[in-house]
């Protein structure tokens, strides 16, 4: 069965109609016969919303239901009320029925069993002195032979966990599968409350992690303190990406820090930029500053222009740059080899006139 892609969670109840909400496809008249009633469910507390076929049943937020998943029937909680959605080119999980007391009792027993196995896994890791943190256990099937146990852990190192797998398998009688995740994945799985007071984005609606850089925090004028720009996972907050495009658009046309500008009171230097309010603080020197709208400040040297020399008169043409001197050619002092035998065999009569008066070949002018 092809699973439906995840959509953002916690959409307003009155804005889930496809005719008005962009997350649920196009208008109803364009969807034709492929429109079905869907409901958003969560399999784990704080997990991502999964959209399932509601079979035209009127569910409410908080209802417990049984969903036909890729792991078989699973207990889930309704997180978003039913709405219409197109199923064209998409597969949907199906809500089988409402959960009854027997399902809820089985869930409570399963939670107690998982908590016990989680404690055992942590104790075994400590006994084996493994630098890891086990934070979640998932069971597929009954405990014992034939069951499967997924163990999620985090670690900064690559570890040899064969001893842990063997010991945990002998203790539980199940097939063990270890899955190492990063600190962001741990925060996503465990959940929590962000500094904004809301549930973490990664546990509610954010489908994938996006790259975040410290430059985004600088562009938004945030204090570069770990307590201000880091999330629950210890990494840069994912929400820095949300407003980056807006800040980049608002920064267009604003002078940069340290640039010399022309203000109504004269020439100054930009010492502070307020992107959201579109204002800048200009310093005129000696502690004299002024906050001005960005529209009243002009760059002293527009883009592409060169500053003029202040010691030259305005009417005087700029001095032409001196032409570079041509380098002198290097002196060649190479010596040619002389053959002594050739000199001895040379006929004196073949020699030309010379300036030496004592020579037989001297010819006065």
Image (tube, grey):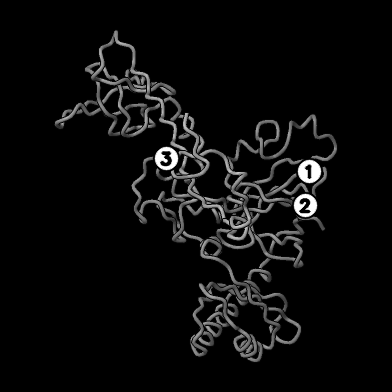
| Rendered position, 194 above or below 281 | below
* Percent x, y of residue 278: 37, 26
Q: Nearer the viewer, residue 58 or 239?
A: 239
1 and 2 marks in contact (CB < 8 Å): yes
- Compare marks 1 and 3 and give the one earlier in the sequence: 1
* Percent x, y of residue 61: 60, 51
Q: CA distance from mark 1 to mark 2?
A: 10 Å
- Looking at the rendering, which quadrant does residue 215 occupy? top left
| Rendered position, 271 above or below 348 | above
Nearest-to-viewer mark from 2 and 3: 3
Which numbered dot is residue 219?
3
Q: Secondary structure at mark 1?
A: strand
Q: Tell me the residue that label 2 is attached to.
A: 92
Which residue occupies 40% across, 43% down?
218
Q: Tell me the residue that label 1 is attached to.
A: 36
* Percent x, y of residue 81: 64, 46
- Compare marks 1 and 2 and give the one earlier in the sequence: 1
Which residue occupies 16% across, 28% down?
288
Q: CA distance from mark 1 to mark 3?
A: 45 Å
């Amino acid at each position: 069965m092809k699973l439906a892609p995840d959509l953002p969670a916690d959409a307003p109840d009155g804005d889930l109609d496809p005719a008005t909400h962009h997350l649920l496809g196009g208008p109803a008249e364009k969807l034709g016969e492929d429109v079905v009633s869907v409901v958003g469910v969560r399999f784990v507390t704080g997990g991502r919303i999964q959209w399932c076929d509601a079979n035209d049943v009127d569910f409410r937020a908080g209802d417990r239901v049984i969903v036909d998943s890729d792991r078989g029937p699973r207990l889930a909680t309704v997180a978003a009320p039913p709405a219409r959605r197109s199923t064209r080119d998409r597969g949907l999980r199906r809500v089988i029925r409402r959960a009854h007391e027997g399902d809820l009792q089985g869930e409570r027993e399963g939670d107690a069993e998982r908590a016990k196995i989680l404690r055992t896994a942590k104790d075994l890791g400590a006994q084996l002195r493994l630098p890891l943190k086990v934070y979640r256990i998932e069971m597929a099937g009954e405990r014992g032979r034939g069951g499967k146990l997924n163990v999620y852990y985090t670690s900064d190192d690559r570890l040899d966990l064969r001893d842990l797998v063997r010991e945990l398998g002998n203790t539980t009688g199940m097939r063990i599968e270890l899955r190492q995740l990063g600190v962001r994945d741990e925060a996503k799985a465990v959940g929590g409350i962000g500094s904004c007071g809301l549930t973490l984005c990664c546990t509610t609606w954010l489908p994938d992690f996006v790259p975040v850089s410290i430059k985004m925090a600088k562009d938004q004028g945030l204090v570069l303190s770990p307590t201000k720009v880091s999330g629950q996972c210890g990494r840069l907050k994912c929400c820095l990406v949300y407003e980056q495009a807006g800040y980049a658009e608002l920064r267009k046309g604003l002078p940069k820090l340290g640039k010399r500008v022309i203000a109504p009171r004269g020439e100054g230097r930009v010492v502070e930029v307020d992107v959201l309010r579109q204002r800048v603080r200009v310093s005129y020197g000696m502690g004299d500053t002024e906050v001005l709208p960005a529209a009243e400040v002009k760059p002293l040297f527009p883009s592409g222009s060169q500053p003029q020399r202040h010691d030259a008169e305005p009417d005087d043409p700029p001095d032409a740059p001196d032409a570079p001197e041509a380098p002198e050619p290097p002196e060649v002092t190479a010596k040619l080899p002389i053959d002594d035998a050739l000199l001895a065999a040379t006929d004196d009569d073949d020699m030309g006139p010379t300036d030496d008066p004592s020579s037989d070949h001297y010819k006065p002018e």
